[in-house]
Amino acid sequence: MSVPDYHTHTVRCGHATGRAADYVNEAHRNGLPAIGIADHLPLLHAKDLSLAMDLADLEDYVREVQDLQRTFPGYVLLGIEADYRPDTLDDLRSLLCSYPFQYVIGSVHYLEGWGFDDPRYSNGFEERDIDHIYRDYFDLVGDAAECRLFTILGHLDLVKKFGHRPRNRLEAHVETLAARIARSGSIVEVNTAGLRRPAAEIYPSRDMLEVLKRRDIPITFGSDAHRPSEVGLGFGAALDLVRLCGYTQYAVIMPTAGSTGRIQLHSLPL
Ligand code: ZN
Ligand code: FE
Ligand code: FE
Ligand code: ZN
């Protein structure tokens, strides 16, 4: 028995393989209780079809997932992963309102235009102070929580992806971020993709998760699968980690037709 995987991509984003149906079938085969498809929302600040689908494809994406919802009633959720960027916030708000997403994963992938998690631009880490990068990043994640557009905050410490560690522990910054997230009512995603990156650990780290738990911030799980075989990957380790941090429950998004799903807390599986 496992937990739902709410963070999966599809071939539409230009850097993943497999159709939504392949991810759903894989989840079903692996015995996951539910799956959410959350492909990258079309970029609002640029056009790069290797990062996200074209705006013209969004309607087909929604329809494709809705078709799967009819085939697997109550099993499939329609989600989306959206970038938090201060410069496109108004456009983002109106785009999200135009589609019946049941949840939105809010992710910070840019620091002042720098796509820091994109291997093509990873030299940017050599040009900046690492503690500065972490602080700016956490500030933006807090802003993302407070804009209230996102159900779930994605990969909370993504800045560690390529293995760059802060020089200092930044505890005060993490505390401030946790307080902002708690006030916003956002869920934090436990994302196993970090295990498959140079960081070699789950997002967020154990230290951060312990701070989140002290404020009882709810969690969900996501593999950030970019190929069907990655669905649910690392969930055993994720469950071990959250239990270690004191979590006994996780959030489930209830499939409420046509609107943002309601949240229920369920006990973690044994
Ligand atoms: Zn991606
Ligand atoms: Fe992401
Ligand atoms: Fe993702
Ligand atoms: Zn992601």
Image: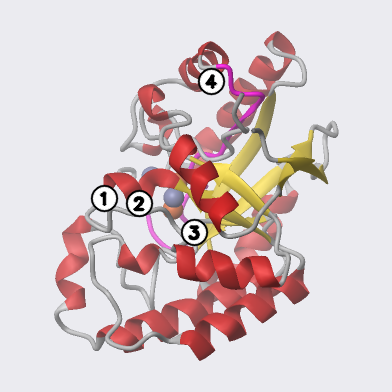
In this rendering, the label closer to the viewer, 3 or 2: 2
The residue lying at 70 percent from left, 64 percent from top is 217
- Which secondary structure, mark 3? loop
Residue underneath mark 4: 27
Front one among 156 and 101: 156
Q: Report if residue 64 is visible in the image.
A: yes
Front one among 111 and 154: 154
- Which secondary structure, mark 1? loop
Q: Which region of the structure is painted magenta?
A: 31-47
Q: Report if residue 51 is visible in the image.
A: no
**Image-based side of 206 in relation to 95, left or right:** left
The residue lying at 59 percent from left, 23 percent from top is 32
| The disc label shown at residue 44, or none | 3
Q: Quadrant of residue 160?
A: bottom left
| The disc label shown at residue 197, or none | 1
**Image-based side of 85 in relation to 117, left or right:** right
